[in-house]
Image (cartoon, rainbow, N blue to C red):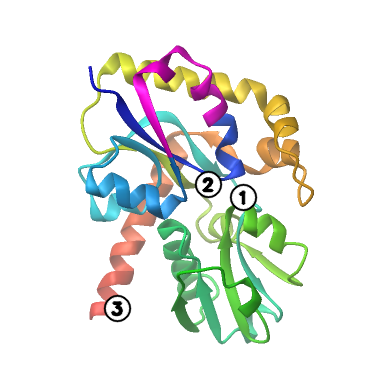
């Protein structure tokens, strides 16, 4: 029987989920592929993987894809690792460099800049590390481990999870386990259980990955919210609707 190809994210925030998967019996049924979020989304769209921890913005382009587990990378307020970084207050920003590693965070930043902060800076796509270009009135959206590091550098930090909560009153889901095809029910059940088991070992995972820039135990328990619930699903629907509105405005 062919193994199920699973795309995982090579960020610290996914480590608890991956820890559970790697130690579960289900591990024998899957091939793990590790990449950054936007690359996982591309592999999912191309069909080179069957399921991936992918940015939820992929659902905008591929509405037949589906969320298939009870776990995700989300937040209910600040996330700490998805932020707009700047040397000046947000109202003085003239350009924003957009992180190439996540479609969802870029789309979220665009929505918040327009609707929440009511700003219209120049938006610049990137294809490589751009942290040294965050200076003066040029800000940058950074995600993942690099964002946790940047917190020690930039004087102005605007958390996108916190801003979304203030703007909508809802939590947010940055990435979820998304499949591009129907998968066996017994696999989904076992995969879901492996995710849940991984979250029982937060302390172990934190100790396995020494990270001097941020307290990982605190990050995993106070910032990242791993559970998919009705409010997060509502947030995804609203987010996708706002992406559609943004595209309509851009094309209009």
Compute the Cα span from label 1 to label 2: 6 Å
Residue in view at x 43 percent, y 48 percent: 235
Q: Earlier in the sequence, mark 3 or mark 1?
A: 1
Dot 2: within a 10 Å radius of its alpha carbon, few (fewer than 14), some, or many (20 or more) residues? many
Location of residue 242 with respect to 2 vertically, above or below: below
Location of residue 152 with respect to 21 vertically, above or below: below
Percent x, y for residue 46?
23, 48
- Label 1, on which residue? 77
Q: Earlier in the sequence, mark 2 or mark 3?
A: 2
User: Which of the numbered marks, if any, corresponds to residue 111?
Assistant: none
Q: Dots 2 and 3: beta carbons under 8 Å?
A: no
- Label 2, on which residue? 171
Residue in view at x 51 percent, y 81 percent: 119
Percent x, y for residue 45?
25, 49
Residue stretch rendered in magenta on the structure: 18-33
Q: State how many labels appear.
A: 3
Residue 88 seen in the current view? yes
Q: Secondary structure at mark 1?
A: loop
Q: Dots 1 and 2: beta carbons under 8 Å?
A: yes
Front position in the image: 42 or 225: 42
- Label 3, on which residue? 250
């Amino acid at each position: 029987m062919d193994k199920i190809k699973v795309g995982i994210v090579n960020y610290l925030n996914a480590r608890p989920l991956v820890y559970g998967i790697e130690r579960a019996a289900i591990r024998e049924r899957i091939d793990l592929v590790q990449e950054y979020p936007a690359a996982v989304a591309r592999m999912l769209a191309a069909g080179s993987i069957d399921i991936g921890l992918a940015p939820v913005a992929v659902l905008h382009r591929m509405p037949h894809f589906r969320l298939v587990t009870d776990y995700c990378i989300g937040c209910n307020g600040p996330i700490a690792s998805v932020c707009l970084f700047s040397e000046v207050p947000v109202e003085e920003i003239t350009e924003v460099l957009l992180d190439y590693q996540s479609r969802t965070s870029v789309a979220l930043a665009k929505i918040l800049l327009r609707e929440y902060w009511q700003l219209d800076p120049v938006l610049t796509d990137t294809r490589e590390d751009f942290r040294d270009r965050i200076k003066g009135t040029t800000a940058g959206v950074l995600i993942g481990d690099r964002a946790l590091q940047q917190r020690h550098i930039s004087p102005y930090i605007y958390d996108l999870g916190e801003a979304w909560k203030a703007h909508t009153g809802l939590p947010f889901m940055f990435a979820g386990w998304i499949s591009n095809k129907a998968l066996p029910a017994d696999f989904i059940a076992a995969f879901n259980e492996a995710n849940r088991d991984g979250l029982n070992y937060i302390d172990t995972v934190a100790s396995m990955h020494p990270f001097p820039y941020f307290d990982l135990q605190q990050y995993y328990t106070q910032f990242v919210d791993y559970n998919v619930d009705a409010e997060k699903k509502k947030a995804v629907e609203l987010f996708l609707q706002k992406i559609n509105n943004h595209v309509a405005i851009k094309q209009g």
